[in-house]
Image (cartoon, rainbow, N blue to C red):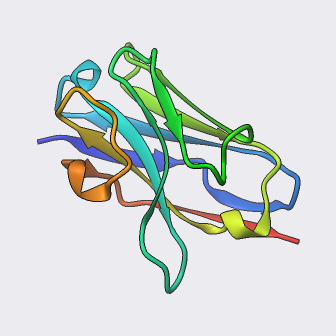
Amino acid sequence: QVQLVESGGGLVQAGGSLRLSCEASGGAFSSFVMGWFRQAPGKEREFVAAISRGGITTRYADSVKDRFTISRDNAKKTVYLQMNSLKSEDTAVYYCAARLLIFTSTTPNDYDYWGQGTQVTVTS
């Protein structure tokens, strides 16, 4: 069983930055595609970014492209989301997720394990 624990969320002013971390345990981290998703109140969970097992391939939602960067350190079993130029519309609970299959995906149902989420609030 894989456990994922996010950290790094908080309150930040618009234009500021945050770095989220997600540490995995209980599985072969380098075997998983990793993704970040977010869910704002009253909205469905949406894709933010994903990274391949080796860290070579990344994908981003159009809304965060050029502002957010996903990366991973397989030795530390951790995936990161660097968020710059934050906007009020980035306010949400952010979740990391792990996928057993080889290809990245933007669909929440394609991911097998989820963390508990970390709140990001951007004030204008």
Residue ID at (18%, 48%): 112
Q: Please tell me which residue is depicted at 40% across the width and 42% down the height of the picture.
A: 35
- Position of residue 108 relative to residue 19, above or below, is below
Q: Quadrant of residue 104?
A: top left
Residue 93 in the figure: left or right of residue 68: left
Which image quarter holds the N terminus?
top left
Q: Tell me if residue 70 comes above or below residue 42 in the rendering.
A: above
Hey, which residue is sitting farthest left in the picture?
A: 1
Residue 102: image x %, image y %? 22, 26
Is residue 25 or residue 13 the one in the foreground? 13
Whether residue 56 sits left or right of residue 63 in the image: it is left
Q: Depth check: 33 or 113 in front?
A: 33
Residue visible at 49% across and 80% down in the picture: 43
Displayed quadrant of residue 77: top left
Residue sitting at the far front: 62
Q: Position of residue 86 (x, y in %)?
A: 78, 54
Of residue 62 and residue 49, the one placed in the foreground of this image is 62
- Quadrant housing the C terminus: bottom right
Q: How many marks?
A: 0
Residue at 39% of width from left, 36% of height from top? Answer: 23
Q: Is residue 36 above or below residue 58?
A: below
Residue 13 placement: quadrant? bottom right
13 left or right of 27?
Answer: right
In x, y percent, where is residue 61?
Answer: 56, 48
